[in-house]
Image (cartoon, rainbow, N blue to C red):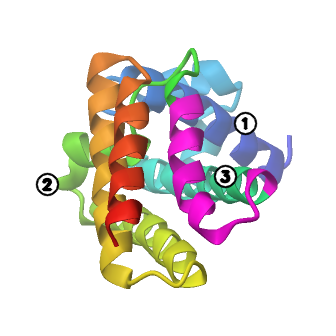
């Protein structure tokens, strides 16, 4: 197995296990078993578990933000409605069978205080999401301050959905976002 294939298999397994069970409860031997990549190869690719966690978060970030942007662009042409479509996408995500909350919030909760590398990945993801909302607000001719408020609504919905296991937080956050847009 070449390095690129081994890396993909290891990251696929890491994502499933880290997101499903939590980072601290998953060892490199668990990754080996789920991926079919030998421990020796795993440690060649990721000399420390922290590096595997960092790579998992980076890869998930690209996919998560790409899926969000594609959803918003496909469903809405009105710039203001694109902001509300973010909450529609969150509702769909929260309804997925394997939804277990926000991977970055979960990772920060587990490792953020002890791993600056993980904390940096989490901050980068959250800033990129905030920047995306800012770009949607700008396109709609809305102030950046509104994007910050919408960001907080979305983040609160993510945390609450992860805890409650329901999609309702997205619905409630969307209605709050609608009220913010109407009040401007």
Which residue is at a point 60% across and 81% down the rendered structure image? 139
Q: Which residue is mark 2?
A: 113
Q: How dense is the environment of label 3, judged by Cα within 10 Å: few (below 14), some, or many (20 and up)? A: few
Could you give the CA–CA distance between mark 3 and mark 2, rounded to whole angstroms? 25 Å
Q: How dense is the environment of label 1, judged by Cα within 10 Å: few (below 14), some, or many (20 and up)? A: some
**Can the viewer see residue 30?**
yes
Viewer-proximal residue, 8 or 33? 8
> Taken as a whole, is the magenta stretch helix, strand or loop?
helix
Which residue is at a point 51% across and 40% down the rendered structure image? 90
What x and y, as percent, mark residue 38? 65, 31
Q: How many marks?
A: 3
What x and y, as percent, mark residue 13? 61, 30
Q: Which mark is residue 9?
A: 1
Front: mark 3 or 2: 3
Residue at the right extreme? 1
Q: Which residues are magenta?
A: 74-93
Location of residue 159 (image quadrant): top left
Viewer-proximal residue, 146 or 93? 146
Q: Which residue is mark 3?
A: 63
In the image, is residue 36 part of the stretch drawn in magenta? no
């Amino acid at each position: 197995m070449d390095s690129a294939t081994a890396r993909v298999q290891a990251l696929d397994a890491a994502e499933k296990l880290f997101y499903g069970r939590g980072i601290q409860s998953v060892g490199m031997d668990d990754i080996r078993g789920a991926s079919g990549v030998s421990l020796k190869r795993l440690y060649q690719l990721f000399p420390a578990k922290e590096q595997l966690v960092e790579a998992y978060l980076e890869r998930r970030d690209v996919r998560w933000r790409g899926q969000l942007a594609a959803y918003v662009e496909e469903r809405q042409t009105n710039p203001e409605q694109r902001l509300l479509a973010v909450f529609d996408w969150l509702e769909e995500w929260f309804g997925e069978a394997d939804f277990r909350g926000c991977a970055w919030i979960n990772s920060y909760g587990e490792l953020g205080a002890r791993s600056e590398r993980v904390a940096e990945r989490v901050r980068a993801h959250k800033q990129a999401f905030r920047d995306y909302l800012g770009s949607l607000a700008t396109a709609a001719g809305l102030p950046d301050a509104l994007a910050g408020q919408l960001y907080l609504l979305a983040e609160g919905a993510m945390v609450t959905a992860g805890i409650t296991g329901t999609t309702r937080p997205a619905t409630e956050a969307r209605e709050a976002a609608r009220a913010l847009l109407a009040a401007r």
